[in-house]
């Protein structure tokens, strides 16, 4: 693992300049993950005890990795076709997954005088554990993917080769406190049954160290002093009393303490407080650095090392009070921060890949976002190591709409809890709190999602969090619910989840809707159609025909929910606003425009309202950041990491210093999300008819905007006569030296979108009449000159510089010109970090863009750039 993460660190630093190394601390001393298993259906096993005996004949079993669901393992062994293409996954029979499956592996024990443990979590959803023919735990004990089990198997193992086996039982999210896919995607045929996290084998002497962590208290707002209190559980697993010395360093400062333990006694050692002046404070990306501190402890008995622990932590302070409007306002190290993020999705088959996770987090930063929300599907430790070192904030929590909320969600899916569920829930909370508490990237934990827990469930969670020294905020729900002790969540979950027009987001009048006020925990305008490259990778030609010709038809790659089964609402809006698509290409290019303008407006409206005196917008989680498979909705980038209109709309909206058009006031605003005041700015607005005629021009000089998310109105546009029904607005912001720092082009209509608020449903508000953007089809042809040069970048990357120039002689802009890095076969090179993209240029204007990507992803071919615009045609230029 350390080697893989070091490679990830190099790539991440290259793609996103300024990122510190992303390597984790690596495994602790005396432990190693089981590297892989052989799996087989229990229907083919006659004797459970025999499976875990050394020498068992596993001929015909399937080899899988350290973390694998059953279906993912069988897929890797060639049993099934690509589940991301067409309806291949739908055609997989489910009967094979109705019975338990065995996971079998051998482990070696070099010194049987030491104690041996199995550290187990990530079981979906329960398992019997066997070692050398003895069952050491049952499915009633090892139950749930978040519970953690430290099984002492010293008596069952011997020197040399030993065998372990897990009989994993079928997963059922509506009946188990487990993981499910709700309405995000189609559910895999095995429902992710398997082992989603590594099982670690630990070895130690009589005294074991567990749960080492550091409680930090940072002086806020001065940030000039921090108190560090290291703690660890010290456990004597032998049959005799011992006296142990626990010593080590906390952020380089020495600590030591002696502890006496009776046979099988556990004590929590709390070391004296260490005061640190001028501490190295951890900040989210864009606000400061991400220094990590180290905690190293060793337990010795009679001068001999018994166990050791090594972990990382960060020094930072997080608060999340309710503001005067009842919204949840996060403060990091005393500074208010607008949360701008997206809902995180793991791979649909829960295949963990540290490099891919780093690529996605790098996209988060390239998008100008600062947070990912994990609703269930809480990723392995390496994910949070990456987030710490990249400065990406995380908001983990339990998921909605299944057993997790079955006791409080009325008649929705998810069975009510039985008595057996309460200790599983509390154990899950204990394990996740202990695992995540030292990660400075973790902002908070949602103990509820669509619903808040009742008093009994809440008490179990809060008791577990308190016992774990949980340092971050605890939120009762992601919706506007309250739990008995924590009270109101300070969040809202009013939708929408399907199409609404851009002006929707500026609404504050409808308090049951999703406009830019309060903390919006999950919301978007639904469909996010991928690029044509991705569509052809995920759907058959016949399916693509249906996609554009019949949006009302069910779409397998949207959702298994009837509510989100088709694209009718989106398709109606696309035809009503842009004109009925005439081909697949026309459908896709219009979809990209619709997504760009909508996602841009969603983020711009919330950013502008962050510092409002009344009903400010304190946070926005776009639903979702990404999809775990090939999807037609809820994603800013797709399963192959390609970037569509949604991606670049979000990237444009989240520029650090940004000029934007406000749909509600028809004015130009400047939003400054940097940490410093910006002065001497010049803002300009120009309006153009679709024939290129300029109808309005206005400039304001010497504009100043405070930092920290402040905004200032730059220019009122008001009512302009002589505009065509569809027109273009070009907004430009330059600094005191005349350098362009923000450029933003809008396509607008003299006819506004009208929303039918009285007919609002939980997932959208209908549009009663559409804006007229069909005039874009009348844009004349424009010529774009393109040149590209490539050069080696740092750490195995290539940097390609692209210059685009509108060489047209008339007045027509080159509208929404998209650049894609491609290899010699025309296949997109992914992942890629663009400085900007999907740009519009008026005659004589030029722009220089840069793309950074892994050289290896060219697969030996020379890089090329595919340039395609709304009215420019397509060309490919070599570099």
Image: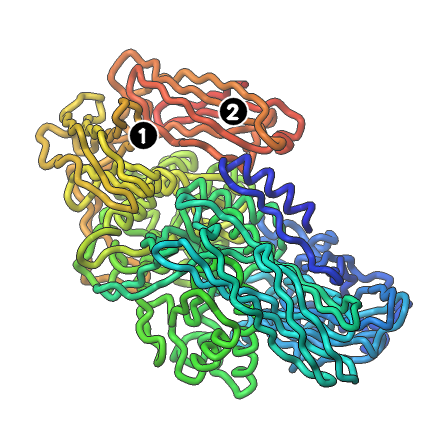
Specify the quadrant of the image occupied by residue 491.
bottom left
What numbered label is drawn on residue 166? none
Q: Are marks 2 and 1 in contact (CB under 8 Å)?
A: no
Instruction: Between label 2 and label 1, give the one nearer the viewer.
Output: 1
Specify the quadrant of the image occupied by residue 299.
bottom right
Picture residue at 30% right of the left edge, 46% below the top: 708
Q: Residue furthest top?
A: 809
Horizontal side, residue 105 vs residue 656: left or right: right
Q: What colouring method underlies this structural image?
A: rainbow
The image position of residue 439, as x and y in percent, is 52, 59
Asked if 572 appears above or below 120 in the picture, the reply is above
Asked if 573 appears above or below 181 in the picture, the reply is above
What numbered label is drawn on residue 800? 2
Q: Which residue is under mark 1?
A: 741
Quadrant (top left, top right, bottom left, bottom right) of the C terminus: top right
Judge by depth and name the residue closer to the eye, 18 or 484: 18
Horizontal side, residue 333 vs residue 273: left or right: left
Picture residue at 78% right of the left edge, 76% below the top: 153
Instruction: Please state the total of marks drawn on the protein image.
Output: 2
| Mark toward the start of the polypeptide (2 vs 1) | 1
Asked if 457 appears above or below 145 in the picture, the reply is below
Measured in 3D between alpha carbons, the distance from the residue under mark 2 to the one under mark 1, in whole angstroms, is 21 Å
């Amino acid at each position: 693992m350390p080697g893989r993460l070091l490679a990830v660190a190099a790539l991440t630093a290259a793609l996103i300049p300024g990122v510190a190394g992303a390597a984790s601390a690596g495994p602790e001393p005396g432990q190693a993950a089981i590297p892989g298993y052989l799996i087989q259906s229990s229907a083919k096993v006659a004797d459970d005890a025999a499976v875990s005996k050394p020498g068992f004949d596993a001929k015909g079993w399937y080899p899988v990795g350290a973390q694998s669901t059953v279906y993912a393992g069988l897929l890797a062994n060639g049993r099934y076709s690509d589940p991301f293409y067409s309806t291949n996954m739908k055609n997989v029979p489910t009967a094979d997954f109705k019975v338990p499956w065995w996971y079998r592996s051998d482990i070696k024990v070099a010194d049987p005088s030491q104690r041996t443990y199995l550290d187990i979590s990530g079981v979906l959803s329960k398992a019997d554990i066997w070692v050398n023919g003895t069952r050491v735990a049952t499915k009633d004990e090892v139950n749930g993917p978040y519970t953690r089990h430290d099984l002492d198997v010293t008596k069952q193992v011997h020197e040399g080769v030993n065998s372990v086996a897990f009989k994993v039982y079928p997963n059922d999210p509506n009946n188990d406190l487990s993981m499910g896919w709700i309405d995000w995607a189609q559910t895999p045929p095995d429902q992710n049954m398997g082992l989603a996290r590594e099982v670690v084998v630990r070895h130690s002497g009589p005294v074991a160290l567990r749960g080492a962590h550091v409680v930090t208290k940072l002086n806020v707002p001065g940030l000039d002093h921090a108190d560090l209190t290291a703690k660890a559980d010290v456990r004597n697993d032998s049959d005799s009393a011992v006296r142990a010395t626990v010593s080590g360093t906390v952020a380089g400062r020495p600590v030591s303490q002696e502890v006496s333990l009776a046979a099988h006694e556990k004590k929590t050692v709390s070391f004296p407080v260490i005061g640190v002046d001028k501490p190295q404070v951890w900040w989210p990306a864009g606000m400061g650095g991400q220094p990590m501190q180290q905690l190293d402890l060793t337990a010795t008995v009679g001068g001999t090392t018994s166990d050791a622990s090594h972990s990382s932590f960060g020094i930072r302070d997080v608060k999340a009070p309710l503001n005067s409007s009842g919204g949840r306002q996060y403060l990091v190290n005393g500074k208010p921060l607008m949360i701008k993020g997206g809902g995180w999705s793991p791979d649909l088959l829960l295949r963990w890949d540290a490099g891919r996770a780093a690529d996605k987090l790098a996209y988060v930063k390239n998008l100008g976002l600062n947070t990912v929300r994990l609703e269930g599907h809480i990723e392995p430790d390496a994910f949070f190591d990456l987030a710490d070192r990249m400065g990406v904030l995380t908001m983990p929590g339990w998921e909605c709409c299944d057993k997790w909320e079955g006791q409080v969600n009325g008649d929705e899916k998810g069975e009510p809890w039985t008595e057996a569920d309460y200790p599983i829930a509390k154990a899950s909370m204990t394990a996740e709190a202990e695992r995540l508490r030292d990660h400075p990237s973790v902002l908070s934990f949602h103990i509820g999602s669509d619903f808040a827990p009742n008093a009994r469930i809440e008490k179990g969670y809060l008791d577990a969090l308190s016992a774990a020294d949980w340092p971050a905020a605890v939120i009762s729900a992601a919706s506007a619910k309250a739990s008995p002790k924590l009270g109101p969540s300070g969040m809202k979950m009013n939708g929408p989840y399907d199409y609404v027009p851009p002006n929707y987001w500026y609404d504050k009048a409808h308090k049951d809707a999703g406009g830019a006020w309060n903390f919006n925990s999950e919301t978007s305008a639904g469909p996010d159609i991928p690029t044509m490259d991705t569509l052809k990778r995920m759907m058959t030609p016949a399916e693509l025909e249906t996609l554009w010709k019949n949006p009302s038809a069910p779409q397998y790659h949207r959702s298994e929910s009837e509510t989100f089964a088709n694209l009718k609402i989106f398709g109606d809006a696309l035809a009503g606003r842009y004109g009925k698509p005439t081909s697949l290409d026309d459908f896709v290019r219009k979809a990209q425009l619709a997504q760009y303008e909508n996602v841009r407006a969603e983020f711009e409206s919330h950013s502008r309202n962050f510092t409002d005196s009344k009903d400010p917008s304190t946070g926005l989680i776009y639903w979702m950041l990404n999809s775990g498979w090939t999807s037609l909705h809820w994603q800013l980038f797709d399963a192959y990491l390609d970037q569509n209109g949604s991606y670049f709309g979000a990237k444009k909206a989240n520029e650090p210093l940004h000029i934007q058009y406000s749909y509600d006031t028809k004015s130009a605003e400047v939003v400054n999300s940097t940490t410093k005041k910006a002065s001497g700015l010049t803002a300009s607005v120009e309006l153009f008819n679709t024939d290129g005629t300029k109808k309005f021009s206005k400039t304001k000089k010497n504009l100043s905007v405070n930092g920290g998310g402040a905004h200032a109105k730059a220019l009122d546009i008001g009512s302009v006569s002589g505009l065509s029904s569809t027109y273009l607005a070009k907004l430009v912001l330059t600094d005191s030296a005349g350098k362009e720092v923000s450029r933003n082009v809008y396509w607008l209509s003299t006819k506004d979108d009208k929303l039918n608020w009285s007919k609002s449903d939980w997932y959208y508000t209908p549009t009663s009449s559409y804006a007229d953007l069909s005039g874009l089809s009348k844009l004349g042809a424009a010529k774009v000159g393109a040149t590209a040069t490539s050069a080696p970048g740092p750490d195995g990357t290539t940097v390609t510089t692209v210059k685009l120039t509108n060489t047209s002689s008339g007045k027509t802009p080159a509208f929404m010109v998209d650049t894609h890095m491609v290899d010699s076969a025309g296949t997109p090179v992914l992942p890629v970090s663009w400085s900007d993209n999907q740009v519009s240029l008026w005659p004589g204007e030029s722009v220089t863009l840069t793309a950074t990507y892994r050289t290896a992803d060219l697969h030996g071919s020379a890089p090329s750039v595919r340039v395609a615009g709304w009215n420019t045609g397509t060309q490919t230029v070599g570099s």
